Amino acid sequence: MTLQEIQKIIKGGEGRKTEFKRSQNRLPNNLFETICAFLNSKGGTILLGVSDDRKIIGIDQNEINKLKKEIANLSNNPQKLDPVFMLVAQEYEIDNKLIIIIKVPESTMVHKTNNEVYIRNEDGDYKVSQLEKIAEIVNRKKNYFSEQTVYPNISFEDFDISLIRRTKNLIRINNNEHPWIELNDKAFLSRAGFYKKSDNGGKGYTLAAILFFGTDELIQSIVPAYKFDALVRKFNVDRYDDRLTVRTNLLDAYDLLMGFVEKHINDPFYLEGTTRISLRSKIFRELVANIIAHREYLNASPAVITIFKNKIVFNNANNPRQHGIINPENFTPYAKNPTISKFMLQLGRVEEVGSGMKNVYKYLPEFSKNSKAEFIDDEFFSTVVYFETSETMSEKTSVKTSVKTSVRILEYIQENSIITIPEMAKNLNKTTRAIEMAISKLKQKGKLKRIGSKKDGYWET
């Protein structure tokens, strides 16, 4: 999150998706009421070290690491937050003062803190005690998140244990103090949100668990239409120049799809300060993650990445919240599959919800001149990134050169109606082949015709 984004949030004040808390040297007593309310509602952002009247109070720098660790531990403690939802607290410096920002997404489940359910309203956090109101929250979440579909017949033994171990290693690399690391494999899946109660009261592993840790055979048996397609259509636009079809677990799917993008998209040299960074990675790694994290997996349509000469298009089936082109100035990011999104955040595959769009707008102008991007939220979510490559730039240069050559030929013939092609090539400082190609196009357009033989060199414009 940038300084400008933080200042904009503070300027906007508290609301349905924003909460300020003073918290100079300890966590506020009602912090988890707000976290619970955001999880049960539409998500939101909590700023610690900011007062209700938008003043930046700051947090004691000697206490900030302790507070961040407490947030991580308490969000992972079922006695404090049930079911648990691992949250990451990030510190920022603004006006020479430290604050903590907690970004809380909408959850797939109904959460309690201190055995009470809370929801968010414009005025703050409200306790929900009526069963019918809790049922409304359950039904609303059920309609959005098919990733939480429970499959009671799937057991732990159906999963590929090596995938569980790989994900734990990736989490350790991303955060070596992560509280999930030391859990046994079953407890790890439960804490990560992959094991839950079904609507009829039974328990089981979810579709999200199957997609991450299932064997290829198990995944295809549960969602037989599941696949990702990656295509290159730079020359053969009716079919494809290269193709990759992915039907495996989400961990390997990300690596395979990102490898395909790296194979076909160049990575121009770029320094951020004195450090070289990969523009290709900054722009496309989270767009690849987004097509995985936000697609609707019970829809039979494949998610598709198509690379053209001057653009790359990401398409995936979607449960839209709005329809049409997204305006980045007014866009509030949200997770279509919160469990998958949260897990990819822990793996270090993404930075935060919405960071893909942010990085595209930030780095695309450095990646390519005359570039732009569009994000379209509809029954299919589409991301289109337009850019210029060395190929398209060469083609434009070639076209411009050809046009200039044609104009000079017409002017030259009007002054010298009797002239041969070799003479034109010499006088215009062009190759014979270039003159022949330009003349051929002029003849096709009816702007030039030969009178007499090649040897005579008679022309008429």
Image: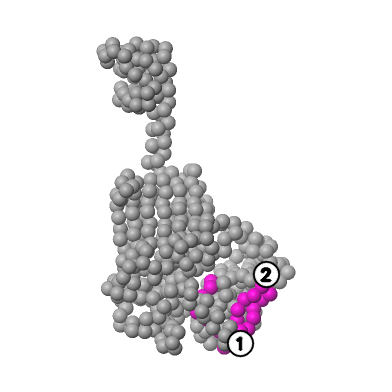
> Left or right: where does residue 236 sit relative to residue 339?
left
Q: Residue 220: where, in percent of width, then height? A: 30, 72
Q: Which residue lies furthest to the front in this view?
A: 446
Q: Disc 1 vs disc 2: Cβ atoms closer than 8 Å?
A: no
Q: Could you say whether the residue bearing mark 2 is in a helix, strand or loop? A: loop
Q: How crowded is mark 2: few (under 14 residues within 10 Å), some or many (20 or more)?
A: many
N-term-proximal mark, 1 vs 2: 2
Q: Nearer the viewer, residue 59 or 381?
A: 381
Q: Does the magenta stretch include residue 109?
A: yes
Q: Looking at numbered disc 1 in the image, what kind of residue is underneath it?
A: Ser
| Quadrant including the N terminus | bottom right
Residues shaded magenta:
105-129
The mark total stands at 2
State the image quarter where residue 57 is shown.
bottom right
Give the answer, above or below, for where 253 lies relative to 363.
below
| Three-letter amino acid code at the position of disc 2 | Glu
Q: How far apart are marks 1 and 2 (CA)?
A: 25 Å
Q: Residue placed at 67% from the left, 64% from the top?
A: 12
Residue 49 location, quadrant? bottom right
**Image disc number at residue 14:** 2
Work out whether residue 132 or residue 369 is closer to the camera in this orientation and state it: 132
Q: Where is residue 260 shown, x and y percent of the image?
A: 34, 56
Q: Is residue 233 magenta?
A: no
Is residue 453 visible in the rendered structure shown here? Answer: yes
Residue 47 appears in the figure: no
Secondary structure at badge 1 equals: loop
Establish if 23 lies above or below 263: below
- Residue on which disc 1 sits: 129
Q: Which of marks 1 and 2 is in front?
A: 1
